[in-house]
Image (cartoon, helix red, strand yellow):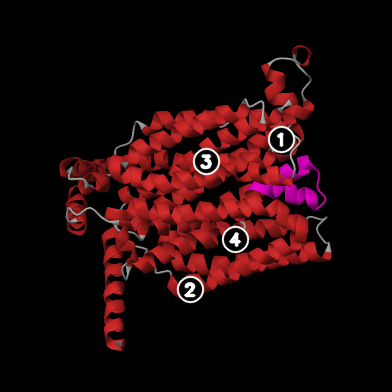
Amino acid sequence: MQHTTTYSEKANKRFLALICFVASLGGVLFGFDTAVISGTFTFVESYFSLDKIEVGWFASSALVGAIAGAAISGALSDKYGRKPVLIVAALLFFISAFGSAIPHNFVALIVARLIGGIGVGMASVLAPLYISEVAPPKIRGRLVALYQLSIVIGILLAYFSNWLLLDVSQTSEPFNGGTGVFNKYLISEVWRGMFGSEMLPSGLFIILLFLIPESPRWLIKNGLHDKGYAILLKISGVKIAKTELAEIRQTVNHVKGKISELIKPGLRLALIVGVGLSVFGQFTGVNIIVYYGPTILESAGFKLDSALQFQVAIGIINLIFTVIALWKIDSWGRRPLLIWGMASVCVSLFIIATQFLIGQTSGIWIVIMLCIYMASLAISINAVIWVLIGEIFPTRIRGRAMSIATFANWGINFLTAFIFPWYVAKIGMAAGFFTFAAMCLLATIFFYRYVPETKGKSLEEIEVHWDNVGEAQKQKSKNEF
């Protein structure tokens, strides 16, 4: 009997690992799609003769799509399921990669990037949502943080791919007289190859999504209790599955959630926390480094090939500290990582801004400070944001609530990416980094004041927490009256 139990537990872990791995590939594509653009700016700007406003549109076009994708994915997934909408997102990634590699005019490139952005927005809501709904409470933080690790891996793969393709274009001799597909995509117009390389991981994602089940919580919420219980059984075993089924039934209670619930006491604070995490997560400036990192390093005096190499180094630092956060998030908790990490982000941004202000950016110190900045981000908000947003909302409205929070994330992402080239051209790079440092100081205060600790709690226990907060707020209002 002991052997059977051990085998069953191993089987449960393998099944859970498989479905979380596949869902996390959405994060790889998220990271790859948003970072691949960083190596193409110089080439695309020259090829299409872009001005600064057009460069801003090029950088932010995918983010417009991401806003739309985030806005619609929650309602779609609540109605049709998490898995079908993830498959649609994967198809959009593939279409975008192909379309971005072949355009002959700037408008066609923007349209292709918009399509990919819709996929990014959908995946950014649904992948962490799906993982949070299948993961056991004790390791949910670690498994949802796996999504952030996947984003970081995707970013690093894009950096490495850009650097490798640039090296090929600079060192390879023209083939067949300088004509043909090889020369166009890998030598003369290497930016096309950079974008097209995303077709490989997106194709793999499409195939693997057919191997995973629907979210058990979505199935139970929609009255498919037997199917939902069967999946819980495969993930957690009989004892835990029965307990989870009872908790889910009790909280869902066969009532369709309404978005208006989010303005009620308790859940209103949950929404404020979710949106606050999303907004401040972008005002750290992280995606400015992802999109414009090589451009920033070029402005500091580095050549493009060196800038891309240092961008890879920054990506490796990001990966290492994301792994540390993944390892410790369920033992240290969400709040300590978030608060102390953000304080470190604030300090590092202030130092980087000062370096630009006094003109001391030509040496290795600017790269070192960017690495410290990225390490601080990786171990704090970058790892914690998707965990908390996936945890703090009730099952019955989780999809739509996460859409609102993620919509805010992509909205601020678009704003910063679009304005950044114009902003630093007008007031300088130092002022740009000082602005981000000030926002991070506000973020640290906000997180300390409002973000609850959720480690080790089931999603249903977290829901009860907000109910208790709401009751306390109602009682306080009555007493004051």
Seen at 52% across and 56% down, the residue is 382
Q: Which label number is shown at residue 117?
A: 3
Alpha carbon separation for disc pair 2 and 1: 43 Å
Main SS of residues in magenta: helix
Alpha carbon separation for disc pair 4 and 2: 16 Å
Residue type (three-letter) at the residue carrying disc 4: Thr
Q: Is residue 240 visible?
A: yes
Q: Which label number is shown at residue 448?
A: 2
Q: Is residue 277 or residue 322 the one in the foreground?
A: 277
Considering only order in the chain, which callout, 1 or 2, is on the residue closer to the N terminus? 1
Depth check, mark 1 against mark 4: the one in front is 1
Disc 4 to disc 3: CB gap under 8 Å: no
Q: Is residue 74 left or right of residue 251?
A: right
Residue stretch in magenta: 291-308
The residue under label 1 is 44
Considering only order in the chain, which callout, 2 or 3, is on the residue closer to the N terminus? 3
Q: Is residue 95 or residue 359 the one in the foreground?
A: 95
Residue type (three-letter) at the residue carrying disc 2: Tyr
Occupied quadrant, residue 352: bottom right
Q: Position of residue 120 (x, y in %)?
A: 49, 42
Tell which residue pokes out farthest to the top in this image.
176
Q: Position of residue 344 (x, y in %)?
A: 61, 67
The residue under label 4 is 284
In the structure shown, which secondary structural element does the residue marked by tag 2 occupy?
helix
Occupied quadrant, residue 89: top left
Q: Position of residue 195 (x, y in %)?
A: 61, 32
Seen at 75% across and 12% down, the residue is 176
Q: Is residue 150 visible?
A: no
